[in-house]
Image (spheres, rainbow, N blue to C red):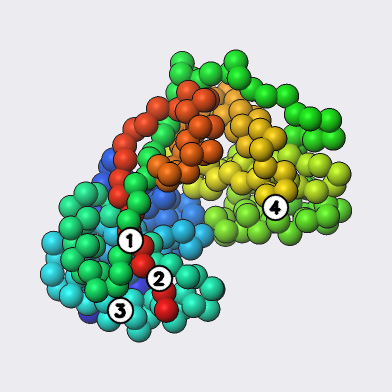
Amino acid sequence: MIWELDRSEFTRCRHLLNPQGQLEAVAVVEGANPGRIFVDDRMSPTSGMIWLGNNDGFLFIGNGQNELFNQELNNFIDSVIIPEAQQVRLEWFEAIGNHDKWYGTIERVFAHRDLGSWNQRVYRLHSDDYNSSNEPKLEEGYEVVKINADLLSNKTAINAGFLRSKVDEFWSSPEDFINKGIGYCIVHQREVVSVCFSGFVVGNIHCIDIETVKEHQKRKLGQKIAHCFVKDCLNHGQVPYWDCMEVNKPSVAVVESLGFQVTYQYVGYEFRID
């Protein structure tokens, strides 16, 4: 049987985490960011699945060769996960192993589901590697603003809901983000057009989420705001962490231009939720 843990029980999964694995898994287990955890044994779990609170995937942790858990996964996903995923309009189930021994299990367990895959890169930036020489200047009319409580509660922006919805994807409340995270946005004619902020935080490591609205792309706004975020992190002894798909060339170009170094790579899998 697969059980869902209460938030107060999440730390029972600490021993299941790969120390070199995804930051997001640690953030959920430690209660820093929202998420749900499903395990094989409520009191003494050996295998588990984390549903990230921002609906950006399902992380498989612990023993990937636990056949009792693996045999129940498809029925559990069909009967419990998919109906709830459809309620939040999730179209894809993204399965990610916290270590590489999950890869073969995911491929075998979900082989009947028209499974696709992609490669993911994880980067970190240390102060000695930061390249500040290519920070672009903004075109006239664009302004960088640090995200604070007043800005999140401000309704004067044309698209005020955009910034708030981005933060709400990752954090339990705006206050939680303000207390733990760092963030910047770019404003143009009272419209928030680009954001870069801490999506997940574990200790002094800040996992970056960045987005520029389509109408304002190709103006180097993402590169500019990433520099602002990185400088703030490094000035306060924080470590920027960037996790992106290998095929996301614009993201890769920005992160590597700043001096980020690849720390590891992993494979993600996906199938459509019908």
User: As rendered, which of 147 and 58 lies closer to the eye?
Assistant: 58
> Which residue is found at the position 31% from the left and 40% from the top?
265
Please, what secondary structure does the residue beneath circle 2 have?
strand
In the rendered image, the vertical position of residue 56 relative to residue 228, given as above or below: below
Q: How many marks?
A: 4
Please, what secondary structure does the residue beneath circle 3 have?
helix
Q: Residues within 10 Å of mark 1 (few under 14, many from 20)?
A: few
In the rendered image, which residue does mark 2 sit on? 272
- Mark 2 belongs to which amino acid? Arg
Measure the C-alpha gap from mark 4 to mark 3.
Answer: 34 Å
Labels 4 & 1 near each other (Cβ < 8 A):
no
Where residue 155 is drawn, which disc sits there? none
Tell me the mark number nearer the camera, choosing from 4 and 1: 1
> Which residue is found at the position 36% from the left and 62% from the top?
270
Tell me the mark number nearer the camera, choosing from 1 and 3: 1
Upstream in sequence: badge 4 or badge 3: 3
From the top left corner, tell me how far across and down residue 77 is, in percent: 33, 76
> Which residue is found at the position 63% from the left and 54% from the top?
166
| Horizontal side of residue 140 vs 256, given as left or right | right
Tell me the mark number nearer the camera, choosing from 2 and 4: 2
Measure the C-alpha gap from mark 2 to mark 4.
Answer: 28 Å
Measure the C-alpha gap from mark 4 to mark 1.
Answer: 31 Å
Viewer can see residue 42: no
- Mark 3 belongs to which amino acid? Phe
Measure the C-alpha gap from mark 2 to mark 1.
Answer: 9 Å
Upstream in sequence: badge 4 or badge 1: 1
In the rendered image, which residue does mark 4 sit on? 163
Q: Residues within 10 Å of mark 3 (few under 14, many from 20)?
A: some
Measure the C-alpha gap from mark 1 to mark 3.
Answer: 20 Å
In the rendered image, which residue does mark 3 sit on? 76
